[in-house]
Amino acid sequence: MTWEIRLTRDTLKNLRGLPLRIIDTVQVLFAELELSGPIRTNWPHFGKLSRKNCYHCHVCRGRPTYVAVWKVIDRQQKIIEVRYVGTHERAHYDRLC
């Protein structure tokens, strides 16, 4: 059974402003999240954030660095909510999860 991926309104808004190469990479991440779940150790700088069931990884290195932040909403029903996709500088991890 695959995971359901939900995007917040802010995430959708941020995606519209990203370069196409970043959007392509984010789509690969979303596909992996859907098929394999929230633990993506194969992505650079993947890690669990301080709050429960909240994770992040770097989508693209360099300047600027792009990151994605997601939270597991329900493990039983397999629901993941992507809370942020954008530059590392604008990612306020404490507010996102």
Image (spheres, grey):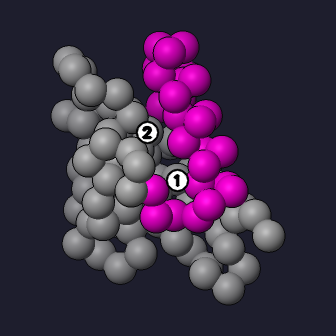
Relative height, residue 52 to residue 19 (above, below): below
Relative height, residue 79 to residue 69 (above, below): below
Residue at the spot of label 2 = 85
Give the dominant element type of the magenta stretch: helix, strand or loop.
Answer: helix
* Residue for point 75% across, 64% down: 2
Badge 2: how crowded within 10 Å, few (<14), some, or many (20+)?
many
Badge 1: how crowded within 10 Å, few (<14), some, or many (20+)?
many
Callout 1 secondary element: strand
Q: Amino acid at mark 1?
A: Val
The answer to whether residue 95 is visible is: no
Q: CA distance from mark 1 to mark 2?
A: 8 Å
Whole-percent x and y of residue 38?
Answer: 51, 64
Q: Tell me where residue 36 sits by quadrant.
A: bottom right
* Label 1–label 2 contact, CB within 8 A: yes
Q: Amino acid at mark 2?
A: Val
Q: Which of the numbered marks, if any, corresponds to residue 82?
A: 1
Callout 2 secondary element: strand
Magenta residues, as a range? 13-40
Q: Nearer the viewer, residue 85 or 95?
A: 85
Q: Quadrant of the N terminus?
A: bottom right
Q: Does residue 40 appear to the left or right of 6 in the view shown?
A: left
Q: Nearer the viewer, residue 16 or 76?
A: 76
Whole-percent x and y of residue 82?
Answer: 52, 53
* Residue for point 43% across, 39% down: 85
Q: Tell me where residue 9 sits by quadrant.
A: top right
